[in-house]
Amino acid sequence: MLEEMRIRSLGVIDDAVVELSPGFTAVTGETGAGKTMVVTSLGLLLGGRADPALVRIGAKSAVVEGRISVAAHAPAAVRAEEAGAELDDGALLISRTLSAEGRSRAHVGGRSVPVGLLAELADDLVAVHGQTDQQGLLRPARQRQALDRYAGDAVAVPLAKYTAAHRRLRAVATELDELTTRARERSQEADLLRFGLDEIAAAEPLPGEDTELAAEAERLGHAEALASAATVAHAALAGNPEDPEGVDATTLVAGAHRALEAVRSHDQDLATLAERLGEIGILMADVAGELASYADGLDADPLRLAAVEERRAALNHLTRKYGQDITAVLAWSQDGAARLAELDGDDDRIGELTAERDALRTELGELAQALTDARTASAARFAEAVTAELAELAMPHARVSVEIRQSEVAGDGADGIEVGGRMVAYGPAGADEVELLLAPHPGAPPRPIAKGASGGELSRVMLAVEVVFAGSDPVPTYLFDEVDAGVGGKAAVEVGRRLARLAKKAQVVVVTHLPQVAAFADRQLLVAKTNDGSVTRSGVTVLEGEERVRELSRMLAGQEDSETARAHAEELLETARTGS
């Protein structure tokens, strides 16, 4: 239950405290006095859209704070505590700050929270209804939602199953559509992959083969120069047999080694040098032997060179198309084979998806029929309950009924599902179109409320629907913003009486311009504006005794001091007190 709201710098309200008590509270005031700011403030507290234009001109920010009493184990209290909030003596403190630059901040129970949390809490705390909600009720989708809300689990359970199946059907249909519409592109991709894989398979490349062949081609292409260089190097090291007089490096090193060996025992340093010369001689002999073997084994084979170049050309053809080297080509081949397997499996996948789609459409038809049956059963009770409420609201002969229908699908029915032996259109909430019908008096045919209800009748239908909801899905607080628009006379008295009766089960706050409604309130708040010549301000005060009579007189006749109006105001208050 809402205990108090503090409003600062919001619209024409400069600084006001709105204290709300249990039962029925009426908020009244002159046109333009800003009484809808009470509704706006509560909307901000409940996560409504923050418009910087709401900030009072000249102020840096607007602040709305609320104190709402909740039971410790109520869903709203549990959700708030999950977000880190703390209750204050059984009350939840909520605040919303809106800057003139457009920034918005929310706090719950002393903890900064996302604005979205306020909207979550609102579902369990307050039901807000205004003239925009009446217009919303004219839409069939909102009427279906109203019926589903009234039906509770009877509709919610099959609706959850239907929604899950509908979501899966959309996913399957999307994938199937992609596979079928892109079949040509995927076929072309598969052909290109097959061609590439066949080329690579025909060449049978080996990892690193291109590098090895490049080295071999380089060697074969310079075989004569390599052999000549090796022969000359060998002669320099080991001597040339054809030149017995020539001096070679090995002989010279051997002579140097022998000279040092003769005297090495006399000096350790010289002995070390002798050992190193010995090692050099051995190394030179080894290198000379390897040079001789290299020169003997090197063969300038033109046929082998031609074969190597031909193989390299084949491998280069692959690297130009599929990778920078053979390793990359082999990686492309592996990935291409996997992708080709996926593409080749499309036909099987299309078959699987088609079968699943058809099965889901059949299942969806059965679930839609279950939804229709549940809604039909609830519709009769809902219509009866709303009709009974209208009788309490000075519409004793009015009858409300609920029409549930489906739209058949023309053609091959590809866009529909079968429900009750007919192919009908469907959506996320089923195949049903729900519409409230009103027969305002005997003999009048039932017509959609959008066409058959006047403004006053629509207000009463809206109120009747909300009262029915209060019995099936109650919340602690109801806020009505001029839902009595278009109502007057006896009907207005009955609206006030019915709101007072609703207030016995919940807290009811009504922004109204009707004295007949305000008179039934347990408490009346006046939103009045003042003007100092430069700034217009509004404030909220509690009316009691004489002040309340004067306000009701003003609402009745526009004159606070009219004796006739005062008499009517006192009569209204007495009627409300006695309930007659």
Image (cartoon, rainbow, N blue to C red):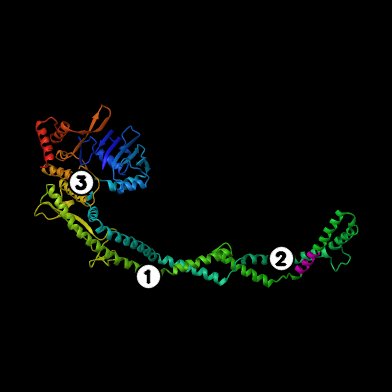
Residue beneath label 1, please? Answer: 351
State which mark lies toward you, 2 or 3: 3
- Tell me, for residue 505, which label it has, or none: 3
Q: Which residues are magenta?
A: 285-295
The image shows residue 101, relative to residue 252, as above or below, that is: above
Query: Horizontal and vertical percent for residue 417?
Result: 27, 65
- Left or right side of 303 for 558: left
Foreground of the two, 502 or 74: 74
Q: Earlier in the sequence, mark 1 or mark 2?
A: 2
The amino acid beneath tag 3 is: Lys
Foreground of the two, 571 or 535: 571
The quarter of the picture where residue 318 lies is: bottom right
Q: Secondary structure at mark 3?
A: loop
Foreground of the two, 499 or 249: 499
Q: Are marks 1 and 3 in contact (CB under 8 Å)?
A: no
Q: Most prominent secondary structure in the magenta stretch?
A: helix
- Left or right side of 276 for 113: left
Q: Secondary structure at mark 2?
A: loop
Q: Is residue 406 visible?
A: no
Mark 3 neighbour class, 10 Å CA radius: few under 14, some 14 to 19, many 20 or more: some
Q: Secondary structure at mark 1?
A: helix
Query: Horizontal and vertical percent for residue 557?
Result: 12, 34
Foreground of the two, 155 or 330: 155
Residue at 56%, 65% in the rendered image: 329
Between the residue at mark 2 and the residue at mark 3, the CA separation in whole angstroms equals 106 Å
- Left or right side of 139 for 265: right
State which mark lies toward you, 1 or 3: 3
Residue beneath label 2, please? Answer: 222
Query: Horizontal and vertical percent for residue 342?
Result: 45, 67
Q: Is residue 291 magenta?
A: yes
The quarter of the picture where residue 324 lies is: bottom right
Query: Horizontal and vertical percent for residue 97?
Result: 34, 38
